[in-house]
Image (cartoon, rainbow, N blue to C red):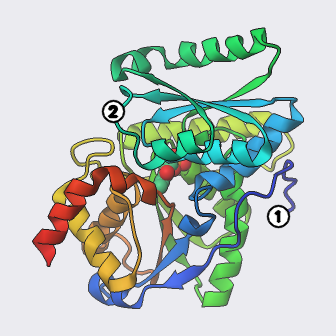
């Protein structure tokens, strides 16, 4: 389908590889072929799924005369770290509004945020939850008073602009499917702010990708994400009035949040360790570990029966592993 994309800035190392997981298929596939789309390889520090969104968001910012990017998330947000690096690479100032008290020692993504020169403001979790919209607006006004223009990017870069990243990625997946001999597949991704799932769901419909897109939610619940995907898609349609009409029905695999956002059960760490030993693939405890574990459970329950191929989207997140080193170490002792 002829689709006119808005301008994007080259930030991602794409196309990323689609790799067959031979040993993981034997271990967990129950007759399915398991594949991984390596979007953890879109870069090193400017990496993961957020980079595909930022290609469009950064172009949007520059084309609207912005010199500053403001965004928000948890202390270990991959999206905030990717934004910090995108800003540094493009000569834009970056201000991160983070949820949680500033830790005594900066680690993982937060250390990288500072390294890339981002300005960081931390707010206690309760205040952040209640006041995030006004905090972002206040900082935006602060820069306006200095004669600067700041774009506020929502959590995870998930809005009508960011979703273009995974709409475009579906064209890449089409080529991957042809090259790999995949006629039809289920695609499984972690979902946290919804934009990746929205982009994939829209993109699959627009590009007639023979795939069913599933989001494994790592926070909130199914209802929340059905609404969020519909909202991001509506924002996309409203901003770009010439896009083709397309029906979507998002699908969420709920039940794998565990103890809460960023808190994974021991079983998730053990599965991460096993996958890494089998395939040399590192997942993270916040997003991809839970999503992979959800995928394995759903395969066992017969969810994907009748379709040979399952593609796991590796959305990155490795830096979030290091602040959780104690839990990972414990799981390694348990599985050796
Ligand atoms: C942000 C993120 C996700 C979730 O993507 P959304 O578009 O926010 O739903 C998944 N995996 C990783 C590693 C992420 O950083």
Q: Is residue 131 above or below residue 200?
A: above
Q: Quadrant location of the N terminus?
A: bottom right
To which residue does mark 1 refer?
1
Residue 202 seen from this side: no
Q: Residue at x 63, y 65 (%)?
A: 42
Give the number of marks.
2
Residue 257, labelled with which disc? none
91 sits to left or right of 121: right
Find out whether the residues at labels 1 and 2 contact each other: C-beta distance under 8 Å.
no
Helix, strand or loop at mark 1:
loop
Give the residue at the far top of this rendering. 145
Q: x and y percent of residue 330 in the render?
A: 15, 62
Residue 336 left/right relative to 143: left
Numbered tag placed on residue 104 in the rendering = 2
The correct choice, above or below, for 318 with respect to 78 in the image is below
Q: Is residue 209 left or right of residue 65?
A: left
Residue 204 placement: quadrant: bottom right
Q: Residues within 10 Å of mark 1 (few under 14, many from 20)?
A: few
Residue at left offset 54%, top offset 31%: 72
The x and y percentages for residue 206 are: 73, 60
Question: Which residue does the image show at 34% across and 77% down from the upper left?
Answer: 276
């Amino acid at each position: 389908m002829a689709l006119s994309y808005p301008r994007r800035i080259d930030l991602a190392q794409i196309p990323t590889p689609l790799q067959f997981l031979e040993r993981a298929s034997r271990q967990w596939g129950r007759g399915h072929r398991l594949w991984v789309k390596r979007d953890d390889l879109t870069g090193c520090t400017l990496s993961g799924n957020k980079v595909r969104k930022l290609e469009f968001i950064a172009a949007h910012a520059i084309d609207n005369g912005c010199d500053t990017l403001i965004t928000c998330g948890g202390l270990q947000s991959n999206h905030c770290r990717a934004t910090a690096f995108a800003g540094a690479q493009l000569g834009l100032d970056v201000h991160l509004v983070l949820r949680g008290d500033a830790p005594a020692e900066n680690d993982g993504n937060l250390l990288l945020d500072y390294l890339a020169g981002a300005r960081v403001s931390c707010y206690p979790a309760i205040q952040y939850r209640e006041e995030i919209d006004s905090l972002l607006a206040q900082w935006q006004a602060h820069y306006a008073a200095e004669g600067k223009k700041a774009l506020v990017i929502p959590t995870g870069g998930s809005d009508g602009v960011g979703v273009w990243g995974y709409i475009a990625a579906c064209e890449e997946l089409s080529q991957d499917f042809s090259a790999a001999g995949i006629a039809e597949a289920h695609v499984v991704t972690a979902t946290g702010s919804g934009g990746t799932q929205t982009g994939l769901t829209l993109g699959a419909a627009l590009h007639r990708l023979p795939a069913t897109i599933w989001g494994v939610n790592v926070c909130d619940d199914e209802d929340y994400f059905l609404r969020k995907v519909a909202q991001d898609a509506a924002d996309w349609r409203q901003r770009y009035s010439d896009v083709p009409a397309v029906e979507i029905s998002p699908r969420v695999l709920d039940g794998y949040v565990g103890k809460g956002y960023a808190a994974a059960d021991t079983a998730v760490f053990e599965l991460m360790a096993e996958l890494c030993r089998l395939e040399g693939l590192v997942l993270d405890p916040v997003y991809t570990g839970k999503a992979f574990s959800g995928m394995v459970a759903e395969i066992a329950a017969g969810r994907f029966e009748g379709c040979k191929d399952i593609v796991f989207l590796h959305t990155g997140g490795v830096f979030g592993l290091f602040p959780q080193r104690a839990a990972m170490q414990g799981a390694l002792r348990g599985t050796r």
